Image (tube, grey):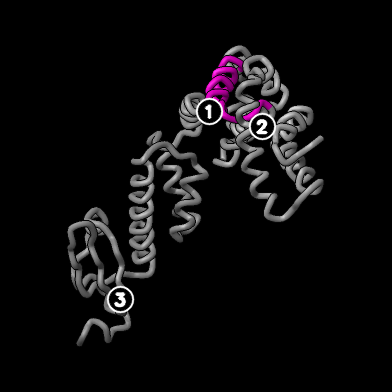
Amino acid sequence: MQLESTGKIFIKDIKHFKKKVLLILSNGEEMEITEGIVMDYYLFPNKELNKEDLNNISKSGNMTKALNKAYRILSHGLYTEKEIYLKLVKSNYSKDIIRDVILKLKRLNYLNDSNYVNEYLYNASIKGYGPHKIKNELLKKGIDEKVVNSISFNEEEKMNQLENIVKKLDKKYRNYNYQKKCDNILRSLINLGYDFDDSKVAIDKFVTENEETDALALAKDLEKIYKNKYKKYSGRDLINEVKHSLMKKGYKYDKINAAIKELDDYED
């Protein structure tokens, strides 16, 4: 009598590959497992398996695959519990498997949100992140809100870092007019997570108006805008459009008027 005819499930074959083992059952199903599972459950061809055996073997196989995936992810750096959870959910592992994987990783100290926070704060400081960005990013990564709110920042260190960033941005935007430069620096600082008021203080302290640079930038923008607007406007309409465009770029009204007066085809 053939094994399949008994209505019971037997192991039809066990195929060993380099990185996995394939368990082929008499009902046509295949289960991907490991050598360790073969040994743990003493599996061999023609062995009969009941429902509990199959469930345990399947769970062990899924657990091993999920754990190996988590190891591969963690080999690239630190992750929070939430990040690992979401990556395993995306791979369609069950919540029970994911829970067991996370618990094991925590026992092995491969997952440790406290260590993650310390590492993140160090890297964030190097990148020049401000308090708001740091806290928001940690919350997104699943760090407990109480932990995030407990993080304190040394005021002197924060302002020193902020001032150093302002000095670098001042050089980056050196060819901009004063107002546009300040606006761009302020926007950059807000995006990095610094307070508006602290940012303004640092900008006012280290960014100074340079009349020569502003005059050159104004002349350059005036020429460019004038040529562009000349195609559509003329006379007073042309001048008003040019003024409006230059004002939007942050140039002062009296400086704009003075520069426009220098145009050969314009009389005040």
Q: Position of residue 267 (x, y in %)?
A: 79, 37
Question: Looking at the image, can residue 241 be seen?
Answer: yes
Query: Going from the N terminus, do you reach mark 1 or mark 2 first?
Result: 1
Q: Position of residue 76 (x, y in %)?
A: 36, 41
Q: Which mark is residue 172?
A: 1
Picture quadrant where residue 154 is located: top right
Q: Is residue 2 magenta?
A: no
Helix, strand or loop under label 3: strand
Give the alpha-carbon distance from disc 1 to disc 2, as whole Å: 12 Å
Q: Is residue 115 above or below residue 87?
A: above
Which contiguous range is marked in magenta? Answer: 159-178
152 left or right, relative to 168: right
Q: Nearer the viewer, residue 153 or 55?
A: 153
- The residue at which mark 3 appears reads as 9
Q: Is residue 184 above or below residue 151?
A: below
Q: Nearer the viewer, mark 2 or mark 3?
A: 2
Q: Nearer the viewer, residue 232 or 235?
A: 235
- The residue at which mark 2 appears reads as 180
Q: How many marks?
A: 3
Query: Going from the N terminus, do you reach mark 3 or mark 1 first?
Result: 3
Helix, strand or loop under label 1: helix
Asked if the residues shown at circle 1 and circle 2 are in contact, with their CB atoms under 8 angstroms apart, the answer is: no
Crowd band around label 2 with a 10 angstrom C-alpha radius: few (<14), some (14–19), many (20+)? some
Helix, strand or loop under label 2: helix
Query: Going from the N terminus, do you reach mark 2 or mark 3 first?
Result: 3
Q: Which residue corresponds to the image point at 80% horizontal and 49% vertical from the top-left?
A: 237
Identity, as a three-letter code, of the amino acid under mark 2: Lys
- Chief secondary structure of the magenta portion: helix
Identity, as a three-letter code, of the amino acid under mark 1: Lys
